[in-house]
Amino acid sequence: MLSPSGRCYSFDARGDGYGRGEGFAVLVLKKLSSAIQDRNPIRALIRSVGMNQDGHTGSGITQPSKGMQAQLIRQTHEKAGLDMRHTRFFEAHGTGTPVGDPIEARAIGEAFFKHRSSEDPIYMQVQTLQALPAPMN
């Protein structure tokens, strides 16, 4: 599960596990009406959120469920009232493992299969965490 190199190469042939790391991000959320009133730049809207638990998978807790991930993608779009044909970009988790990454990629493909084509693909961004070596003094 942990990468011997301490690096996470999600959706990459070098993927041999995930690299533990720490980081932070800041996300400022505001009601749309308040942002409009305050004349703030609006970069995105959150129309729906969703989460699930993959449940039992054949090879244990470290293996994601393709069916449950595809179902969550479809349900979240439906809850938001969004047509999946209009989704052009998908941000993926990326396990960094030879088992998990293909399962996640297939789940995304399964969810969008009817709505995308090779001429009109969906683009994926992968979030990875990498543990970097400590600086030498």
Image (cartoon, rainbow, N blue to C red):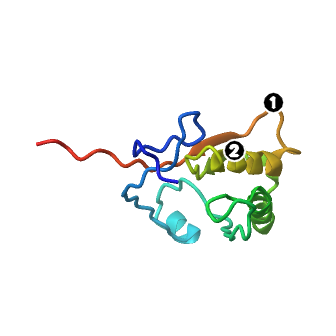
Residue 103 horizontal/vertical position (percent): 71, 49
Question: Which residue has dot 1 on it?
Answer: 118
In the image, taking residue 38 as reference, residue 84 lies left or right, namely right
Counting residues from the start of the chain, the first of labels 1 and 2 encountered is: 2
Q: In which quarter of the image is residue 60?
A: bottom right
The percent position of residue 110, horizontal first and vertical second, equals 82, 48
Label number found at residue 63? none
Q: How crowded is mark 1: few (under 14 residues within 10 Å), some or many (20 or more)?
A: few
16 and 137: which one is in front?
A: 16
Q: Indicate which label's residue lies in the foreground, 1 or 2.
A: 2
Q: Which amino acid does label 2 sit on?
A: Pro
Label 2 sits on a secondary structure element that is: helix
Q: Is residue 68 or residue 14 the one in the foreground?
A: 14
Query: Where in the figure is residue 15, as x and y percent of width and height?
Result: 54, 40
Which mark, residue 102? 2
State the residue at coordinates (40%, 46%): 6
Q: Quick check: 1 above or below 60?
A: above
Q: In which quarter of the view is residue 54 placed? A: bottom right
